[in-house]
Image (cartoon, rainbow, N blue to C red):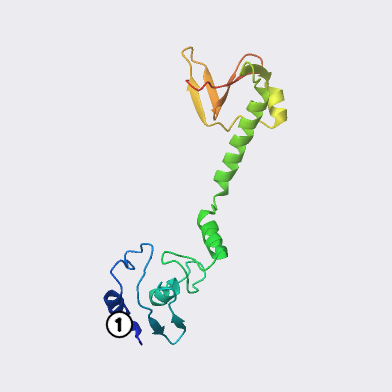
Amino acid sequence: MLFDAANVYQILTIIIPLNIYILLNKPLSIYTRINVLYLSQQEKMITRNNHFSYNFLNSFMNKECMECGESVIGRIDKKYCSELCRNTFNNKENYTNDHYVKDINRMLRRNRKILKELTPAETLESKISKMKLLKKGFNFHYYTNISRNQKGADYFFCYEYGYSPLEKDLYYIFKQREND
């Protein structure tokens, strides 16, 4: 049998039970008792084992790779021609050009790391000099939030680790408890 591309949908609906949902982009599983021969100018293809190949239906979909524009062969919901194109496309989408945000996040992580190193695991609190914090690279201008206690003292936080200035260049550092 010879089919032309214009009548393919009509022919498929006659030959195959209508469990084809090409327009809805659902996964494709088509089985039939007849083998169909389709001749196109680009390829000659015969279905085997009573199963329509994805390439047969993709030849009508004319899908293009979202990255390079090449034709996509494979599953009906496939968007890229290769893993390389998929990775390249996703890397471009996820790349942030905002170096300002990256720098702030780097400083916050560094401050948190320093506070974590200087906070004893047993007591989860300690007193430390300002000079020791500065020597480690701590930057007092970067913190995630501020909390004020009932006495009016300010607590500065880098995520779950906090610090508060005391007298004579001493700082009280601690890890916030989970129920606070």
| Camera-nearest residue between 174 and 75 | 75
> Quick check: 1 above or below 94?
below
Q: Is residue 139 visible?
A: no
Q: Which residue reaches farthest top? A: 151
Residue lying at 35% horizontally and 77% vertically, measured from the top left = 34
User: Relative to residue 77, is residue 114 drawn left or right?
Assistant: right
- Name which residue lies at 35% across and 74% down: 33
- Return the x and y of residue 76 as percentages of the image width and height: 41, 67
Image side of residue 36 versus residue 132, left or right: left
Where residue 100 sits in the image (x, y, percent)?
56, 46
Q: Is 26 rendered above or below residue 141?
A: below
Give the residue type that dot 1 points to. Answer: Asn
Question: For residue 16, what is the image quadrant?
Answer: bottom left
Residue sitting nearer the eye, 18 or 161: 18
Residue at (31, 76) in percent of width and height: 12
Q: Is residue 101 above or below residue 146?
A: below
Which x, y percent locates residue 20?
Answer: 32, 68
Give the number of callouts.
1
- Residue at the (28%, 74%) spot, across then down: 13
Q: Secondary structure at mark 1?
A: helix
Residue 121 lies in what quarter of the image? top right
Q: Horizontal placement of 127 versus 147: left or right?
A: right
Quadrant of the image containing the N terminus: bottom left
Q: Residues within 10 Å of mark 1 (few under 14, many from 20)?
A: few
Q: Is there any visible trace of residue 26 in the rendered image?
A: yes
Q: Residue at label 1?
A: 7
The percent coordinates of residue 108 (x first, y second) are: 59, 35
